[in-house]
Amino acid sequence: MHDNIKDTLSTTPLKVGVDLGGTKIEIIVLSPQGDTLLRQRIPTPAKQNFNSAQDQYRTIIETIKNLVSDSENQLQTQLLNHKFQYIGIGIPGAISPATGLVKNANTTCLIGQPFQQDLENALNCSVKIANDADCFILSEAKDGAAEGAYSVFGVIIGTGCGGGLVINQQLISGPNAICGEWGHNPLPWPQAGETLMPCYCGKQGCIETFLSGPGLTRHANTNWNTNRTPEQWHQALLKGEPLAIKVFETYARQLAKSLASVINIIDPEVIVLGGGMSNIDYLYQRVPEILPEYVFSDQVLTRLVKAEHGDSSGVRGAAFL
Ligand SMILES: [Zn+2]
């Protein structure tokens, strides 16, 4: 190997990010210059396949370990000692500053676990964990859909409903590690037909129970006696089915109401949408049309944009940790 390449490797390790999502686990490896060297994803071990939360938790650790060592094998000529030195991990939850254990995770088998410690033991390298929505918003504010904006609120609406806030390129984090967790506020300005359903957090009627993918289907399938996935509802919308238009009109209004209450507090320049539900183009037309009914202002100049790095934002942000 040429000497100055060796020097670069020894001083600037590759950036490695892992995104642990509700449905998939993804890894990305970036060069020191930010080029993507490797990217792969596998399904997240699902709750219904295990007898206990502990079994699911152990399998998730094992799955991440295999994904990391497989990636190390593929890139071993570019690695010192054939190992990654640091790994950033985005999780659907947060590490409690008080206990060091996972809290607020909608992959509930993580709750109460010493996830960082367990991963460092399994992976034999330094691990930095952050909330997946925070990783996502960091990536989008840095060089994505909100690049150049002073204040950015990012939301992930997928399996769950998370959020994060970046001001002046800095991720805002508070003493409770919950900044941006709008998904567990109640749905504002309630309307007829908005049934309050229980949330995994112990309350009911949280925004997440309406706006997450499972939330949408739970309400739509109950109200209309159907049995469709979010994707099937979306396909029906694209075909112009009147029932699907009705379902997404309700959904767009619920999203607009929920974002209006955020705008009334933070007044961000840009709101970035990520997660599976952010692929529904209908929302970028209807939500800005509905927002002025709820925001306390004569006009609403906040831009609503789709994540530029798609569902890779979370894993890219994790690599920047
Ligand atoms: Zn909740």
Image (cartoon, rainbow, N blue to C red):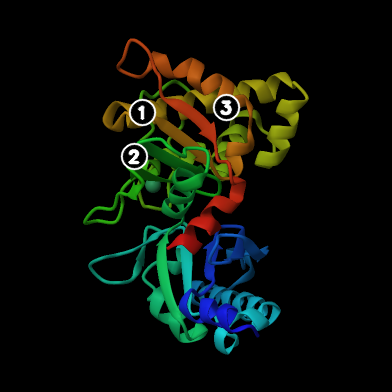
Q: Quadrant of residue 268?
A: top left
* Circle 2 Cα neighbour tier, 10 Å, few/some/many (<14 / 14–19 / ≥20): some
Q: Position of residue 139 (x, y in %)?
A: 48, 50
Q: Quadrant of residue 77?
A: bottom right
Q: Residue furthest bottom?
A: 81
Q: Quadrant of residue 182?
A: top left
Question: Alpha-carbon distance for marks 3 and 1?
Answer: 18 Å
Q: Is disc 1 placed on a helix, strand or loop?
A: loop
Q: Quadrant where the N terminus lies?
A: bottom right
**Numbered mark located on residue 283 in the image:** 3
Assess whether mark 2 and mark 1 are in contact (beta carbons under 8 angstroms).
Answer: yes
Q: Quadrant where the C terminus lies?
A: bottom left
Question: Alpha-carbon distance for marks 1 and 2?
Answer: 8 Å
Q: Nearer the viewer, residue 11 or 39?
A: 11
> At 63% across and 61% down in the image, what residue appears?
36
* Residue placed under numbered mark 1 in the picture: 188
Assess whether mark 1 and mark 3 are in contact (beta carbons under 8 angstroms).
Answer: no
* Residue placed under numbered mark 2 in the picture: 185
* Circle 1 Cα neighbour tier, 10 Å, few/some/many (<14 / 14–19 / ≥20): some
Q: Amino acid at mark 3?
A: Leu
> At 69% across and 34% down in the image, what residue appears?
233
Left or right of 111? Residue 58 is: right
Comparing labels 3 and 1, the label whose residue is closer to the camera? 3
Q: Is disc 3 placed on a helix, strand or loop?
A: helix
Say whether residue 313 is visible: yes
> At 68% across and 42% down in the image, what residue appears?
229
